[in-house]
Amino acid sequence: MKRLFFLPVLGFCSLFFLCAGFTAAAQNKTAAAAIGAYDGPDRMERLIAGAKKEGTLNLYTSIAASDVSLMTGEFEKKYGVKVVVWRAANDKVLQRTMAEQAARRNNVDAVQIASLELEALARENALQEENSPAFAHLMPGAVPRHRQWAAHYLNVWVQAYNTQKVRQDELPKTYADLLDPRWKGKLGIEANNEEWFYSVVEGMGESAGLKFFRDLVAGNGLSVREGHSLLNNMVISGEVPLALTVYNYMPEQARAKGAPIDWFVIEPAIARANGIAVSRQAPHPYAATLFYEFVLSQDVQRMMSKNGYVPTDRNVASPLKNIPISLIDTGKMLDSEEKWTSVFNKVIKGGR
């Protein structure tokens, strides 16, 4: 696999109840399980008291630095629990978490990354099942059946354009419109958007979808850029007049600051979830579970929505309003990721 790079996983120590040899790792594992499962009316009171006693939280995340700072700052202010952040790309967080699990190093408390990588961690028995009251308010598909992670916002791919290079009245309304020769040399795409590619192809029907992308690359070309922020900046500079895969909040935030960029959607908008999970071996299980509840709270969902993120809480207004969204089936994509990474590389990057 290209992105979901799995490391060998050593088995966990057996749990021995009421035994003098009860290890610290087993104790934390047992505590995380008990805390995650508890659903009594005093759940939050217990979490707060336990988290204050632990005093710290180790968070591995892929969220933009400014947004994670805002979130963790509010958490520290509200609960007095220090958050130690390690931030990297989704695949790097996955790799580090798996390496530490294999080495039986219990460092991470909470993991906050894309759903594809979270599902990979769940399949490797690295995450703790939770029983959160917040689940009742989340949109369908936000919580998998195993409940080992929960989506707290959606990364929605939109199409962004430079308002000085492209007129609003000439924007494509369908993917087929992108085959018009007017778009030759003007289109860009992010280099690791296999999930978006897979969803669009599946929506068209695999044969027709692959033919469309082959025709698009052969006829008009696609400028492939590494990183959504870079691609967004290329649209602002005019080097890429129209980008096919930019996260919705990026052009919106730039537009609000006066940049010559705007966005639209070739419906339906394709989305993938970003989620939160508690490590099965969390060294600070109370703080980890409290942060989990904090992230899923409506206050934080509203805060993220104001920054352009699409919340998963049904009672929090979305910045996309009434735009239809197609949420990627994480499990299905994970099962076929190797295939679609290969196809994406051949068709989009290799032009065949």
Image (cartoon, rainbow, N blue to C red):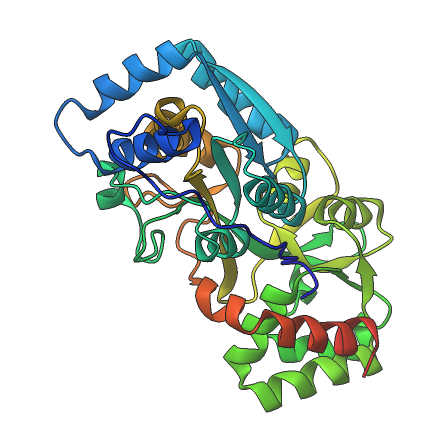
Find residue 255 and report its image quarter: top right
Q: Position of residue 299 (x, y in %)?
A: 35, 27
Q: Above or below — where is 192 with respect to 56?
A: below
Please state if 196 lies on the left or on the right of 211 as rendered. left
Quarter the C terminus occupies: bottom right
Q: Above or below — where is 45 with respect to 171?
A: above
Toward the viewer: 85 or 235?
A: 85
Question: Would residue 329 be visible to someone looking at this image?
Answer: no
Farthest-out residue, left: 41
Find residue 300 and report its image quarter: top left
Q: Position of residue 83 (x, y in %)?
A: 52, 19
Please state if 181 lies on the left or on the right of 100 as rendered. right
Please state if 92 lies on the left or on the right of 50 as rendered. right
Toward the viewer: 11 or 243?
A: 11
Question: Which residue is found at the position 37% from the left and 42% from the top?
Answer: 128
Question: Would residue 334 be visible to someone looking at this image?
Answer: yes
Question: Which residue is found at the position 82% from the left and 76% from the top?
Answer: 220
Please state if 119 lies on the left or on the right of 33 as rendered. right
Q: Position of residue 77 (x, y in %)?
A: 44, 10
Question: Which residue is found at the position 32% from the left and 45% from the top?
Answer: 129
